[in-house]
Image (cartoon, rainbow, N blue to C red):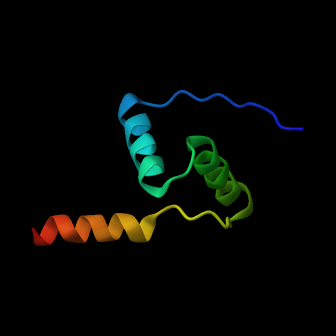
Amino acid sequence: MSRTVSARISTKMHDELRERCNLIGESINDFIVACMEIGLHNSSEFNFGDELMDEIEEKKSTS
């Protein structure tokens, strides 16, 4: 059985979260669950898209 948790976050943070999830093709729910796994268990199998974000930043800086 699963439970629902609600949290208030800033509009900016929500926009960043939505953008990242769209880029990596994952749901906001799965992203947040993985963040909680790291916070609680110090590990997660989730791919947060860090390498993709690094590539995007590198392309921006070389353009």
Asked where in the image residue 55 lies, by quadrant, the reply is bottom left
At which x and y percent is residue 62? 12, 72
Q: Position of residue 45 (x, y in %)?
A: 67, 67
Q: Position of residue 13 (x, y in %)?
A: 41, 38
Front residue of this view, candidates 43 and 24: 24
- Residue 56, relative to residue 17: is it above or below? below
- 56 with respect to 5 (left or right): left
Image side of residue 48 versus residue 46, left or right: left
Outermost residue, right side: 1
Whether residue 61 sits left or right of residue 4 in the image: it is left
The quadrant the N terminus occupies is top right
Above-or-below relation of 7 to 36: above
Task: Please report the residue visible at 56 percent of the width from the left and 65 percent of the height from the top.
Answer: 47
Give the image quarter of residue 37: bottom right
**Which residue corresponds to the image point at 55% horizontal and 51% vertical from the top-left?**
26
Q: Residue at x 44, y 47 (%)?
A: 22
- Residue at image location 9% in from the left, 68% down from the top: 63
Question: Exactly how many numbered labels are in the figure?
Answer: 0
The picture places residue 41, in percent across and down from the top left corner, at: 74, 62
Residue furthest to the left: 63
Relative height, residue 2 to residue 31 (above, below):
above
